[in-house]
Amino acid sequence: MTSQLDGSPDLSGRTALVTGAAGGIGLACARRLASAGADVVVTDIRAAAAEEAAKSIDGEGGGRARAVVADLADLDAAEALARECSPDILVNNAGMQHVAPLETFPPEVFSRMLRVMLEAPFRLVRAGLPAMYERGWGRIVNISSVHGLRASPYKAAYVAAKHALEGFSKVVALEGAEHGVTSNCVCPAYVRTPLVEGQIEDQARVHGLPPDRVTSEVLLAREAVKRLIEPEEVAELVAYLCGPAAAMVTGASVSMDGGWTAH
């Protein structure tokens, strides 16, 4: 592995565990890290999609990829996964969305969302840190959201989970600094993924708008740059945070939101 600060990061010899990696942002991150030479563990609850994703990535840029099926709502299984994989790089990306007013928000959905998007990252980090500390190097990148920095109505569980993830990431940064481990959040606005596409119908119902008006009038209403973010753009930022040039970037929340939080 090189120590150069210019060009693409060289992650040869590193193992990267990416959750929710069968599609969307997770798949783009897994592919980008593999292209930098990392061996990638493609983790997802969808077995066939995870296998297909790993097969499409394997060998890119010298990196290898393999699929591991896991339901991160099973917190003991999440912790066992991190111990077995012993990653140098952990990308906490898996997530879900549910759009509903507070008074009708299903409590079981709220609980599952917090397990997957907050408790599972805690358990993965908890199990992965000892080996990172022993090696004196580690990169933890939490895929947060602009909703980790700002709130929107009808997204109680998602906003709560992402705000908590931001705080958790900062604690990891403070504890990990002396051991060569960085921890950061990437905070994109709406990314062109199946998760966002699935929200359009929900938002149309809640706001009483036809679906073709939701993107411009709801999703992009607060953004200065009026377009969806591409998954590959997020992956490029993740790869930077995993490389040597970002060694002093830790405890940060890096916005990629088209100017949303500039308001």
Image (cartoon, grey):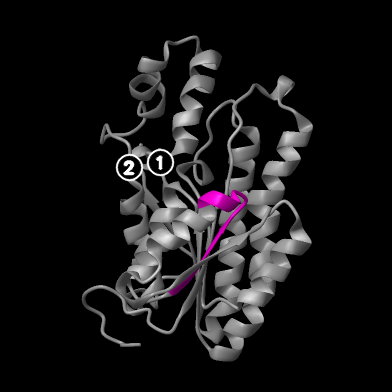
Q: Helix, strand, or loop for circle 1?
A: loop
Quadrant position of residue 33: bottom left
Distance between mark 2 and mark 1 Cα atoms:
7 Å
- Inspect the magenta stretch and tell me whether residue 48 lies in it: yes
Above or below — where is 108 with respect to 144?
above
Q: Nearer the viewer, residue 71 or 127?
A: 71
Quadrant position of residue 72: bottom right
Residue that numbered label 1 is attached to? 189
Residue 229 numbered tag:
2
- Inspect the magenta stretch and tell me whether residue 58 lies in it: no
First to last magenta residue range = 39-49
Q: Position of residue 108 (x, y in %)?
A: 78, 35
User: Residue at coordinates 66% horizontally, 76% vertically from top-left?
Assistant: 84
Quadrant position of residue 192: top left
Q: Nearer the viewer, residue 134 or 67?
A: 67
Q: Position of residue 229 (x, y in %)?
A: 33, 42
User: Residue at coordinates 36% horizontally, 43% vertically from top-left?
Assistant: 257
Evaluate if marks 2 and 1 touch, with contact meaning CB atoms under 8 Å apart: yes
- At label 2, the amino acid type is Ile
Nearest to viewer (mark 2 / mark 1): 2
Above or below — where is 181 with respect to 119?
below
On the picture, is 149 further left or further right than 77? Answer: left
Residue 80 numbered tag:
none
